């Protein structure tokens, strides 16, 4: 039976991946330090005989190596994620994202294991030339602006991955995920849909940072998982990088109205200065759209979930949670 290691498997995306692999009758081992992930996310598979959890950090390279040695494939998702979290704790973010990935790649090279590395659309930075193709320039802001450390750390992860591919012949795939959403995603680190939904359900103002004219393209986490599983089956994927996301744009202010409508909420919609939430000189991108042509050449890529499905799923998830306390940012 095929055996997979998922780093960060108690997180939002990792838990869906673990669940899907268990459903496909694979063995799954997860390493997670529970810094942003939770046992609750994997509660439905925790006691499954094909599932094993190690609560530890990927910075513990001895444990990590042992885990890599005993599996067939590694999905590397563990990272410090989310603009808010990265700005609050830049050192931990940079170290986890770079040293952690280095440990994963080194272990995979030592035991000759295939590995998929999750990168991010953030690495396109301030590039305005949408849609972004994988070969586009990375336009990163000043190093005095902490938010860019996330993009830079993920860019270094990509450089490292391709260096391991070339020097050690390591079969790697890099994926750049664009805004991925669904149940289990926390709003705590600045993710917009869970935040809007939670604000709407609790009757607090739905807060838009800036004028709401900025757009994003949202993909359901289940569409991401099915794409990852298709990609790893294709030989042509190895040694390359792929955008994964939706290319259907929505303005953030329209998203707020949509959430309000779906939740039938009385919440007022409030526009606030992002500098109130982050810090002075905060920079954001106005548009972020993936070019999906490269991905479509390799696999049959189609979205199964619309933005309405995504919001509905997140609403259903939060309705079942008990912590809908007053929530402002
Ligand atoms: N959600 C998105 O929209 C999105 C977009 C682009 C890229 N990504 C990437 O996808 C991956 C998963 O993101 P997510 O949204 O599921 O975030 P998440 O925070 O829910 O998952 C990250 C997981 O990694 C774990 N982790 C963090 N540091 C660790 C460490 N040192 N050792 C072991 N585990 C550790 C956390 O506890 C958590 O369970 C990340 O690499 C992220 O950069 C996500």
Image (cartoon, rainbow, N blue to C red):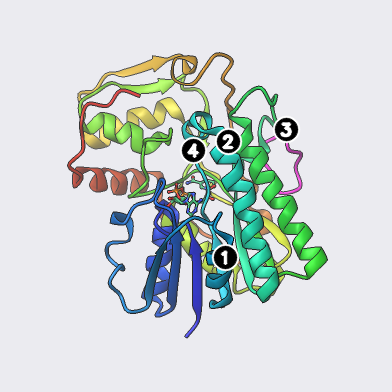
The residue identified by callout 1 is 62
Residue 88 drawn at (x, y percent):
49, 29
Q: Is residue 22 above or below residue 267?
A: below
Q: Say whether marks 1 and 4 touch (CB < 8 Å).
A: no
Query: For the image shown, how many numbered marks are present on the structure?
Result: 4
Element under label 4? Answer: loop
| Label 4 beta carbon within 8 A of ligand 1 | yes
Residue drawn at point x = 70 percent, y = 24 percent = 142
Q: Quadrant of residue 294?
A: bottom right
Q: CA distance from mark 4 to mark 3?
A: 19 Å
| Label whose residue precedes the other's in the sequence (2 or 4) | 4
Q: CA distance from mark 2 to mark 4?
A: 14 Å
Residue 239 drawn at (x, y percent):
73, 64
The residue identified by callout 3 is 139
Residue 296 visible in the picture: no
The segment highlighted magenta reads 129-139
Residue drawn at point x = 43 percent, y = 53 percent = 33
Residue in front for this viewpoint, 260 or 32:
32
Spot the residue most to the bottom: 1
| Label whose residue precedes the other's in the sequence (1 or 4) | 1
């Amino acid at each position: 039976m095929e055996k997979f290691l998922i780093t960060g498997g108690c997180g939002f995306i990792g838990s869906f991946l673990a669940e899907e692999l268990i459903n496909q009758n694979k063995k799954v081992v997860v390493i997670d330090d529970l810094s942003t992930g939770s046992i609750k996310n994997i509660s439905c598979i925790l006691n499954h005989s094909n599932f094993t959890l190690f609560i530890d950090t990927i910075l513990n390279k001895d444990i990590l190596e042992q885990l890599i040695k005993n599996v067939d494939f590694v999905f590397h998702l563990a990272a410090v994620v989310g603009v808010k979290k990265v700005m609050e704790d830049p050192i931990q973010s940079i170290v986890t994202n770079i040293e952690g990935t280095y440990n994963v790649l080194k272990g995979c090279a030592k035991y000759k294991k295939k590995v998929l590395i999750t990168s991010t659309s953030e690495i396109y930075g301030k590039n305005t030339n949408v849609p972004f193709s994988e070969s586009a320039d990375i336009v990163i802001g000043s190093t005095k602006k902490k938010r860019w450390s996330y993009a830079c750390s993920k860019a270094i992860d990509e450089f490292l991955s391709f260096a391991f591919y070339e020097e050690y012949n390591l079969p790697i795939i890099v994926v750049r995920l664009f805004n991925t959403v669904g149940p289990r995603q926390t709003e705590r680190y600045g993710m917009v849909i869970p935040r809007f939904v939670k604000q709407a359900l609790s009757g607090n103002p739905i807060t838009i940072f800036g004028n709401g004219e900025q757009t994003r393209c949202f993909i359901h986490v289940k569409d991401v998982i099915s794409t990852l599983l298709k990609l790893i089956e294709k030989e042509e994927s190895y040694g390359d990088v792929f955008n994964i996301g939706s290319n259907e744009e929505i303005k953030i202010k329209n998203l707020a109205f949509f959430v309000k409508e779906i939740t039938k909420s009385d919440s007022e919609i409030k526009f606030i200065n992002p500098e109130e939430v982050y810090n002075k000189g905060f920079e954001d991108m106005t548009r972020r759209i993936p070019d999906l042509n490269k991905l479509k050449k390799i696999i049959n890529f189609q979205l199964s979930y619309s933005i309405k499905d995504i919001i509905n799923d997140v609403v259903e998830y939060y309705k079942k949670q008990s912590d809908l306390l007053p929530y402002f940012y």
